[in-house]
Image (cartoon, grey):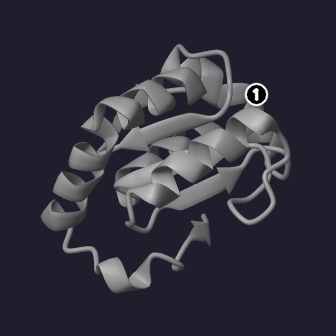
Amino acid sequence: MSVLEKIQRQITENPIILYMKGSPELPSCGFSAQAVQAIQACGERFAYIDILQNPDIRSEIPKYANWPTFPQLWIDGELCGGCDIILEMFQKGELQQLIKKIAKKYNFSTESTQDRTNV
């Protein structure tokens, strides 16, 4: 499986996925930490990829997404954006609405907010 196929599979199989530096429990940069905080505040589970542990993905996803920076939040197969956009959406209440809508669409349980996976 090529790196691009791997990225496509991750995005397809995980309705809410964050490509970030570090993990939600231990972010390795301030932007990733802020993004995680906003997403966690929405109260639904999400998958993540630590790009520091996956250099092949780190080098390829900016080309795939046409977005050069990290973190990158993908929701329902579409790139939402990076830290600034995530925070702006959160402040406007848009992120919460979108994440709740996707959680309902995919039957997420709000009781499993700690069920995060490094896929």
Residue at 19% x, 74% y is 107
Q: Camera-side residue: 55 or 99?
A: 99
Q: Residue 35: in sight, yes or no?
A: yes
Q: Mark 1 highlights which residue?
A: 59
Residue 2 seen in this snapshot: no
Q: Quadrant of the C terminus?
A: bottom right
| Residue 76, position as x, y percentages in the image | 29, 46
Q: Is residue 114 left or right of residue 16?
A: right
Instruction: Kindly state the secondary structure of the residue where label 1 is placed.
Output: helix
In this view, 79 is above or below 14:
above
Few, some or many residues within 10 Å of mark 1 (<14, 14–19, 20+):
few
Instruction: Say which quarter of the image contains residue 31.
Output: top right
- Residue 94 position by quadrant: top left
The disc labelled 1 sits on which kind of residue?
Ser
**Left or right position of 62 against 112:** right
* Residue occupying the point 59% across, 41% down: 35
How many dots with numbers? 1
The location of residue 63, given as percent across then percent down, is 60, 17
Residue 105's place in the image compared with 16, above or below, is below
Is residue 99 or residue 66 the one in the foreground? 99
User: x, y percentage for residue 100?
Assistant: 23, 57
Task: Please report the residue visible at 47 percent of the width from the left and 32 percent of the height from the top.
Answer: 86
x, y percentage for residue 29?
A: 82, 39
